[in-house]
Amino acid sequence: KNGSAVTGKAGEVIDIPVLQESGEVVHILLVGVGESSNSHIRRASAAIGRKVKASKSSVLSLLVESDSDAQLHFISSALATYIWSQKSGTKSLTPEITLVGDFAKVLERSKVQVKSTWKARDLIQTPSNIKNPVWMAAQAKSLARDSTLSLKIKSGRQLAEFGGLSAIGNSSVKNPPRFVELSYKPKGSKKAPHVVLVGKGITFDTGGVSLKRPYEAMAPMKSDMAGAAVVLMATIAAAELKLNVRITALLMLAENSLSGTSTRPSDVITHYGGTTVEVINTDAEGRLVLADGLAYADKNLDPDYLIDVATLTGAATLGLSRYYGAMYTRDNKLARKLSDIGDYTGDQIWHMPLIDDYSVALESNIADFNHTADKFKFQGGSVTAALFLENFVGKRKWVHLDIAGPARSEVDAGENVKGGTGYGVRLLTQWLATL
């Protein structure tokens, strides 16, 4: 009647303070779990995490009973406590969360996913006056400490065959491009499936000569390397979890700047493997660097699965907003599996169509392909971007994840802070564990 009735809906928190004989006040939190579905458990858990965020609170949770629910509960509550700040004089406090039950093993594995997602967020949140291709390559090197991991970094003349990466990255003389190849090979893995993950790593995107407009669209572009952060941290997580799958992560690192060495509309570039592409809009740079990575993987790495992850198109965000990533693949069985895992973890994806009739939009009179469609004749920019990338994957079992929407949160709510979310780390790590 007075508006304070308890509803039990997922994420509702009722705080009951209890005065102890010692004078200490203990808080009992009653948390609504709704229908106790996966999404409701995640929402309830995030509410707990937010309640104790930036405090030294100790939480004793009785919320879950099964291993599956315990994993969701721990990860969501821990992710909700994340803080990234460069404010001077601030010290972050960390709460302690204890689950009642026999969950030691599942929590140890869950911690890996939390730490990996946190690190991906750290990389995405780092401002671009610090974060550049060289810095990102150094971060990958510092993280690849496990004996099952090996790292190669290409730069300068070693990138001569990588026409897309060079065309975009050479726009910044001060911060030149890098190609990072991180390999995970567990012991006794000769018969294990081989997965190649390709991540877009544009450490800042001005749009180049096709300068981003309006200005506000450029402000969050430090996050345009989220795909590279995600594939890097999913691989690191797989190594820590000792998953029985071979993984090669390719980080396509570049800064898309405006300078005298910037690529121009109407330029023709030659990608790895020899395919020529006419550049139409330099603000569609992500597909140019990804094309090199996909072609390199197809021709040299013989993957059983080839997956690229990128904050690729605003069109994907227009269609699916901030909670779903756009997934493109011809393999419906694989799509269903990834969708189910996404629904469980919270990294939700929607299977989008590869509409062959739209391929005509990529026809060029002077090169093998245009790299973008004529936006006045064709909408569906996320679809045509995926169709462009498909030209570089050969006959591989390929998935394209356009995470332009969920890679960045516009609000501070739920599991996410405003800014980089680390979307995709949980999805890929859980999927890799099933192979």
Image (tube, rainbow, N blue to C red):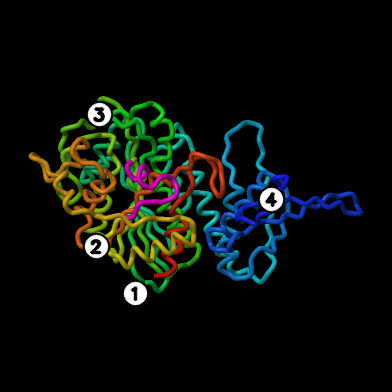
Amino acid carrying label 4: it is Pro
Q: Position of residue 79 (x, y in %)?
A: 57, 51
Q: CA distance from mark 2 to mark 3?
A: 35 Å
User: What residue is drawn where x is 56% and y is 58%?
Assistant: 40
- Marks 4 and 3, Cα distance to the nearest angstrom? 49 Å
SS label for mark 1: loop
**Quadrant containing the C terminus in the rendered view:** bottom left
Q: In the image, is residue 348 above or below residue 155?
A: below
- How packed mark 3 is, by other alpha carbons closer than 10 Å (few <14, some 14-19, many 20 or more), is some
Q: What residue is drawn where x is 58% and y is 67%? A: 106
Q: Which mark is residue 396?
A: 2
Q: Earlier in the sequence, mark 3 or mark 1?
A: 1
Q: Is residue 322 magenta?
A: yes
Q: Which mark is residue 95?
A: 4
Whichever of labels 4 and 1 marks the residue nearer the N terminus, that label is: 4
Would you say residue 421 sits in the magenta stretch? no
Q: Give the numbered dot on residue 191.
A: 1
For the residues marked 3 and 1, what is the alpha-carbon distance in whole angstroms?
Answer: 46 Å
